[in-house]
Image (tube, rainbow, N blue to C red):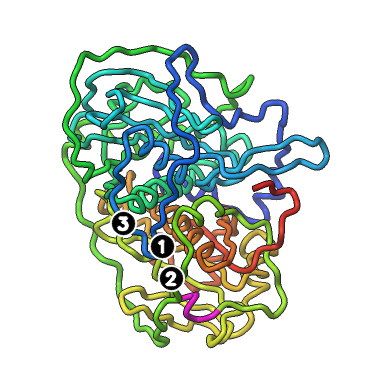
Amino acid sequence: MSWREYHEATKHTVESLRRAPHTLDWSNMPHPFRHYQGVPVLDLPADPPVPETPALEGVGARSATGGATFLSQLLFYSAAISASKLVPSTGDRYALRVNPSSGNLHPTEFHFLTRGLGEWPDGLYHYRPSAHMVEQRACGRLAMAGSSASIVFILTSIAWREAWKYRDRAYRYCLHDMGHAWQALALAAQAIGYDTFAIGHFPDDEVAQFCRLPDDEWPMLLLELTSAGLPAGSGATVWYGGQANQLSKEIIPYPRIDRIHAATRLSSDDARRGIALAEPAPFGSGAIGLPPPALSTRTFGEVARTRRSALDFLGGTKSISLPQLSAILAASTRPLSADFAGARFIQLYLYVHRVDGLQPGLYRYWPERAELELIQGGDQRVAAAGLSLGQDLAGNACVAFSMIGDLRRAVRAHADRGYRYVHFEAGAIGQRLYLAAEALGLGATGIGAFYDDAVHRYLNLAPEQGQVVYHFAIGYPVPDPRLNA
């Protein structure tokens, strides 16, 4: 199956949703946390130091703490549990995390390799967010081919967690969530003084074998801490084994997901051949210059821990300012550090509902000039909600977004692997939009469900101009009484 066949087969239409109704089997819901049984578990210090870096600036002072505290700080502000919600009908509670996820299903797992990290044993670890601890899967010197970094995160995906609810379309959401997790980790590292570099171009099977991953878990992205400046570790490697827990009584197969994942995998020969530099996107003529971005005094640590996905937004007349919108857009277009980020593949279209100083309408954002181009004037609330599967939050927000991915250009540059990269970038932008909105006292939510081709028709996009891959909305969130921070 090619990326094109998968993408076409998983598009939403009114007809496709009517002919394929889906009832959730709650008795077979996948467990939200993976554990490895029978391996050493290492504590991470509770309440690690708060990164005081301004949220909209991002670059912090280098952390001087030891290995355990450093890892605790990095993971607490990128992947840990941040709050819980109450289910009124049952009295049960479920966890929310720092990194967002479609349906709060969290297909992404965080593994990491350390070598020479002060006051921390060399080895391969798996993060256990349910207890803010790490499971030591191996100790001693381990070297991942092609990487000399002292800390390498291996971000993996368990597609079944998403497919349980979203079926064939779930692979798209796994890729979005990988982008969310990538930026959650990268921005947390940046806030405590470390650069990162993401590697999407690696041999899948070799990495899976290196990490001894269970069959239901796939490596998707590697993230190196590139300026840790730490010496290489030493000592023989000892594997602890450990059996991964079974996530549900039955895993329902989704052959389309298996086929698109196979189509986007790389062999060791593919990885050695490297990747082509994608040509830049065509440049448009802007019309409305954006003012200097609004500032925020909130710290990264505060914003990362209080970020939530809004269930809906307050409609009415309350608006955001044009400098706030300028800050949100500036955050979305800062450079991405990755081996596939030589050119950006995502173009933002905005459905502006209530922004002071900007008439309601449909706009295209041109980041090279920090300009907005008016495509169509007039009230966009009904259109934004309707295109987002009738979800009112896209119309009640102050501004909603369509992220248009240049899939053809990505595939020309990276073969079918480019399908992953476009969605990674969309998720990465989504995470930046989340944090920028939170820093400015707003709320946000990602929207993975939309009528694909209806969006293209509304935006007047020809197939060669891109495909919608993600929707997003920002505004004043409706309070959620179920939330326990």
Specify which label sits upstream in the sequence, 2 or 3.
2
The mark tally for this picture is: 3
Report the residue marked by disc 2: 329
85 w.r.t. 355: above or below: above
Name the residue: 21% across, 47% down: 275
Label 1, label 2: how far apart the Cα atoms are: 17 Å
Q: x%, y% of residue 51?
A: 41, 52
Residue in front for this viewpoint, 429 or 408: 429
Helix, strand or loop at disc 1?
loop
What are the residue bounds of the magenta stretch? 321-325
Within 10 Å of disc 2 (Cα), the crowding (few <14, some 14-19, many 20+) is many
* Residue 336: mark: 3
Report the residue marked by disc 1: 54
Name the residue: 22% across, 29% down: 116
Name the residue: 46% across, 67% down: 297
Residue type (three-letter) at the residue carrying disc 3 = Leu
Q: Which secondary structure is most common in the magenta stretch?
A: helix
Q: x%, y% of residue 101?
A: 54, 45
Residue 271 sits inside the magenta stretch: no
Residue 324 sits inside the magenta stretch: yes
Helix, strand or loop at disc 3?
loop
Q: In which quadrant is the N terminus drawn?
A: top left
369 with respect to 433 (left or right): left
